[in-house]
Image (spheres, coloured by chain):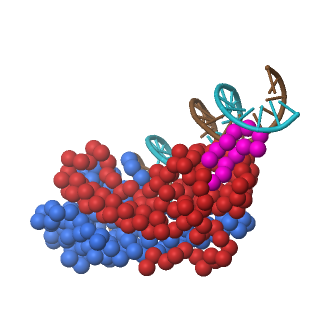
Chain colours: A red, B blue, C brown, D cyan
Amino acid sequence: MKRSSRLSIALHALVHLQAQPGKSLTSAALATCLMTNPVVVRRVLGELRDADIVDASKGPNGGWTLSRPAEEITLRQVYEAMGERLLVRTESDPGDKACSIVRHVDRVMTEFLNDAEALLAARLARTRLSDIAGEALSHGFPHLG
Amino acid sequence: MKRSSRLSIALHALVHLQAQPGKSLTSAALATCLMTNPVVVRRVLGELRDADIVDASKGPNGGWTLSRPAEEITLRQVYEAMGERLLVRTESDPGDKACSIVRHVDRVMTEFLNDAEALLAARLARTRLSDIAGEALSHGFPHLG
DNA sequence: GTTTCATGTAACTTTATGTGTTACATATTA
DNA sequence: TAATATGTAACACATAAAGTTACATGAAAC
């Protein structure tokens, strides 16, 4: 499988949960939908649970549900809950820091990436789970402008 | 070594080339500076050569030089020459496309990432190699604003 | 309380990707 | 023609993500 499909898996699972309000879905059921493994689902949703985005309950009739309405869940919350980086890291070898040019390039790139990360986070905060889930919204993503 | 240090290697090499105007540096010399392997240097600079950012010459006194002044080389050109993505890919498993939710999430994420990519590219276009190389510019990266 | 079912998590395997390395062909200069 | 540098294929190695197995823990239903 591709690298870093975790965010995609998370969103996919959230859309499924939102599509069945009040009903809890098990890791196994979601894994079937997402064509992956129940443990993978638990690992991803576990991070969302720690961020109070979803709830997990054990035992019969247990499973996963949204902690709050889809209108109150932003993509930024999901993104930050997972500790994912949308931007690749471009750091150098640690043993390379003796070179002043390396340090300079690293610092310059780090500043750029930090700024860019904040920019993207702000954009993600504008989109709610309900925005990407509804059929009515087949127009796609709100444009970055 | 870390993931995706290619862009860092490229910038580091370009700064070195710019610091020695008119003088060609060999892959071996650059590899020593960058604490990596000559072949790695050739692989990275080879892509910049294809984009007419650097020139390579063989034989004695051969090596690498900038194709044009550092003021005329933008980070966007470097970035695009390398086919690098600053943003991670978040696509799903190909066999997963039967699910309409997967397709929808993928499309939505792809649109967002494409927009974000264009945004970042525009920012990168504002920065020239000469901006990050000069000692006078110890103030860091031009802020994204 | 016991059974059942679902999450929680550790441990390991598999797979993908980037990087390091060796080897050698090709081209250019003296 | 000898020396030197790039160009590139082929392979080894390291790392990280994902898949998998196994089992402990907890909650509901009977």
* Residue B67 location (% of width, % of height): 25, 76
Q: Residue at left 54%, top 66%?
A: A128
Camera-nearest residue between B4 and A16 = A16
Side of B95 where B18 appears, left or right: left
Residue B108, placed above or below residue A88: below
* Residue A2 location (% of width, % of height): 57, 57
* Residue B27 location (% of width, % of height): 28, 59
Residue B129, placed above or below residue A24: below
Q: Residue at left 15%, top 62%?
A: B138
In the rendered view of the protein, which quadrant contains the C terminus of chain B? bottom left
Q: Residue at left 32%, top 63%?
A: A115
Does the magenta portion include B101? no
Camera-nearest residue between B85 and A130 = A130
The image quadrant of residue B142 is bottom left
Camera-nearest residue between A127 and A89 = A127
Side of B110 where C23 appears, left or right: left
Q: Residue at left 52%, top 49%?
A: A51
The image quadrant of residue B53 is bottom left
Residue B111, placed above or below residue A66: below
Does the magenta portion include A60? yes
Residue A47, placed above or below residue A126: above
The magenta stretch is: A55-66
* Residue A16 location (% of width, % of height): 68, 59
